[in-house]
Amino acid sequence: MFWTFMMFTGLAIVFAQLGAYSILVAVLAGGLKLALLVIAGFVIVLLWRKVFQKNT
């Protein structure tokens, strides 16, 4: 009975850590996508300014 309790407790800790890592990876992936979106926006703005600038 004791070893069964220890096994289930260990599994619960392992699965809790796996869930925490899963959430961490999802948050980091979202941050990376947001950063890429911001960089793409800056590139579009720079290209827009270069192509459609006024010749003065």
Image (spheres, helix red, strand yellow):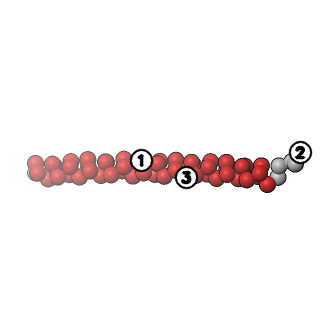
Q: Estimate the spatial distance between the alpha carbons at disc 3 and disc 1, rounded to whole Å.
A: 14 Å
Is 36 left or right of 4, judged from the image as shown?
A: right
Q: Estimate the spatial distance between the alpha carbons at disc 2 and disc 3, rounded to whole Å.
A: 38 Å
Mark earlier in primary sequence (1, 2): 1
Label 3 crowding class (10 Å Cα cut-off): few <14, some 14-19, many 20+? few
Is 35 left or right of 11, judged from the image as shown?
A: right
Mark earlier in primary sequence (3, 1): 1
Residue type highlighted by circle 1: Leu
Q: Name the residue under label 3.
A: 33
In percent of width and height, residue 45 lies at 72, 49
Q: In percent of the image, x 52 and y 50: which residue is there? A: 32
Is 21 left or right of 27, judged from the image as shown?
A: left
In percent of width and height, residue 40 lies at 64, 53
Q: How many marks?
A: 3
Residue 40 versus residue 54: which sits nearer the camera? 54
Residue lying at the far top of the rendered structure: 56
Residue 54 versus residue 43: which sits nearer the camera? 54
Q: Estimate the spatial distance between the alpha carbons at disc 1 and disc 2, rounded to whole Å.
A: 51 Å
Eye-nearest disc, 3 or 1: 3
- Residue 56 circle label: 2
Say if mark 3 contacts mark 1, CB within 8 Å.
no
In percent of width and height, residue 14 lies at 26, 50
- Residue 24 circle label: 1
Q: In percent of the image, x 77 and y 49: which residue is there? A: 49
Label 1 crowding class (10 Å Cα cut-off): few <14, some 14-19, many 20+? few
Eye-nearest disc, 2 or 3: 2
Eye-nearest disc, 1 or 2: 2
Mark earlier in primary sequence (2, 3): 3
Q: Tag 1's secondary structure?
A: helix
Residue type highlighted by circle 2: Thr
